[in-house]
Image: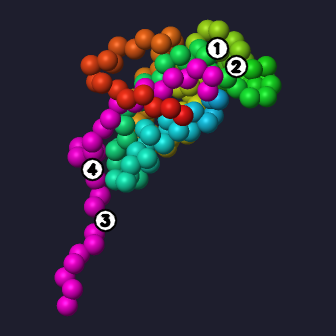
Amino acid sequence: MNTLSYRTESVSAEKAERKWYVVNAENQSVGRMCAEIASILRGKNKPTYTPHADTGDYVIVINAEKVRFTGNKWEQKEYRNYSLHPGGLKVTMADEMLAKFPERIVERAVKGMLPKTKLGKAMIKKMFVYVGSEHPHAAQKPENLSI
């Protein structure tokens, strides 16, 4: 009788090995880039992916002001905020968002692709978005990630 045991091992968040990646957002399409970032934050790029645990890696996004949208999204895409008061809807167009807060374009796109749970909130904290090509995470020795 063969006594080999093939068990799928479930990795906990404490046992997960985490890497740091740097993504250069220059000339990258927002949706395609953010889908890849969300996958890395969740840990879906690893063989030890566990849906109920935060096993993903850290991601640093630089040059957030140089992202691009396809089509007419710069003029047509709206970012909506609602204060829950009557008349409290604020609409910001994508080109205005790029001028005022370019890092929020990437942050909101990735956040929308993560789970809407406590787990998703923990995952989004592992992403750091910066305007310009400098970041303060050199001590973590991040790897360059080409998307």
Query: How far apart are the alpha carbons under marks 2 and 4?
Result: 38 Å
Three-letter residue code for mark 2:
Ala
Between 99 and 122, the one nearer to me in the picture: 99
Element at label 2: helix
How far apart are the alpha carbons under marks 2 and 1? 6 Å
Residues at badges 2 and 1 in contact (C-beta under 8 Å)?
A: yes
Q: Is residue 14 magenta?
A: yes
For residue 80, which quarter of the picture?
Answer: top right
Task: Return the mark for residue 26.
Answer: none
**Which residue lies under the disc numbered 2?**
94
Mark 4–mark 3 Cα distance, whole angstroms, equals 13 Å
Q: Which residue carries the number 1 mark?
A: 98
**Number of other residues with Cα within 10 Å of mark 3, as a class: few under 14, some 14 to 19, many 20 or more:** few
| Mark 1, other Cα within 10 Å: few <14 / some 14–19 / many ≥20 | some
Point out the stretch of residues depicted in magenta.
1-28
The answer to whether marks 4 and 3 mark residues whose Cβ atoms lie closer than 8 Å is no
Q: Is residue 56 visible?
A: yes
Q: What SS does tag 4 mark?
A: loop
Mark 3–mark 1 Cα distance, whole angstroms, equals 45 Å
> Which class describes the residues within 10 Å of circle 2: few (<14), some (14-19), or many (20+)?
some
In the rendered image, which residue does mark 4 sit on? 12
Upstream in sequence: badge 4 or badge 1: 4
Q: How far, Cα to Cα, is label 3 from label 2? A: 44 Å
At 65% from the left and 29% from the top, the residue drawn is 29
Kind of residue at disc 4: Ser
Label ID, residue 8 = 3
Kind of residue indicated by mark 3 = Thr
